[in-house]
Amino acid sequence: MGSIAGLDEAGRGPVFGPMVLCGVRFDESELKELKAAGVRDSKLLSPRRRETLARAITEKASGLEIVELSPAEIDEFRLIKKINLNELEAKTFAQIMDRLKPKLAYLDSPDPNPKLFEQRARKYLKSKPKLVIENFADRKYVIVAAASIVAKVRRDQRIAELRERYGDFGSGYTSDVRTISFLERWVREHGKLPEFARKSWKTAQRIESEAKQKKLTESKYR
């Protein structure tokens, strides 16, 4: 038996808040206990159940690493360094694995081509764990589900803090009318996107650009 790690993220797609990446390490002999406790894909659990399981996972894990990538950090990589989100995720997962030092690591691949994502991750790895990288790994492997739960709970905490400070902004997805309305209103009132928004998201860029153009047009006819 040896140490096994599972890695997953939460908050990859929304325009608001951080992307949270998590790695958990357990001994292989403890995986049955995780499954018996009800650990599974975080999306299939209620918020309260996720919180309960996240506490148990955090207490029992032999290793735990959480990295929060702020909107500003994501934008820096995408807009300035020209590094796409898959590359950024692969790099961060590699850093987490180097800290956890498992013999075997299971990763949820954001890329539809898991082999390509594995190549990206290995580029940054200093340690040499055996890797199992698959799409929907959080549904297949309890160790990845454990990481997804911890990541989701941390991300939800950060979003709750933002809502308490700024009010309701919907789901944070750009397909959500409430999210778009919030962004449009914010830019109209402040002249720029909020600091907790990802400015590299095309929808956010469009809203900011349209607001500035409208302001220029209005100033011409005053």
Image (tube, rainbow, N blue to C red):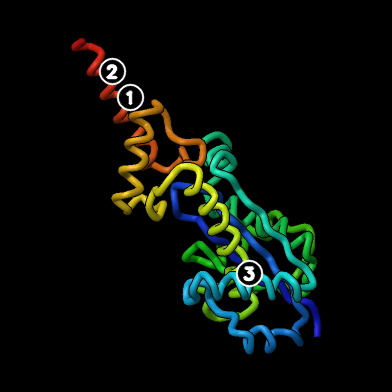
Whether label 2 touches label 3, CB < 8 Å: no
In the rendered image, which residue does mark 3 sit on?
Answer: 147
Q: Secondary structure at mark 2?
A: helix
Is the residue marked by circle 1 packed among few (<14), some (14-19), or many (20+) residues within 10 Å? Answer: some
Front-lying residue, 132 or 74: 74
Residue type (three-letter) at the residue carrying disc 2? Leu
Is the residue marked by circle 3 packed among few (<14), some (14-19), or many (20+) residues within 10 Å? Answer: many
Tell me what residue is drawn at x 47 percent, y 47 percent. 16
Q: Quadrant of residue 23?
A: bottom right
Lower position in the chain sequence, tag 2 or tag 3: 3
Taking 26 as reference, is 161 above or below it? above
Lower position in the chain sequence, tag 1 or tag 3: 3
Q: Quadrant of residue 108?
A: bottom right
Whether label 2 touches label 1, CB < 8 Å: yes
Residue 58 in view of the camera = yes
Residue type (three-letter) at the residue carrying disc 1? Lys
Q: CA distance from mark 1 to mark 3?
A: 41 Å
In the rendered image, which residue does mark 2 sit on?
Answer: 216
Is the residue marked by circle 2 packed among few (<14), some (14-19), or many (20+) residues within 10 Å? Answer: few
Q: CA distance from mark 2 to mark 1?
A: 6 Å
Taking 88 as reference, is 75 above or below it? above
Q: Which quadrant of the rendered structure holds the C terminus?
A: top left
Taking 16 as reference, is 185 above or below it? above
Residue 135 in view of the camera = no
In the rendered image, which residue does mark 1 sit on?
Answer: 212
Left or right: where does residue 175 sit relative to residue 6? left
Q: Which quadrant of the rendered structure holds the N terminus?
A: bottom right
Tell me what residue is drawn at x 39 percent, y 26 percent. 191
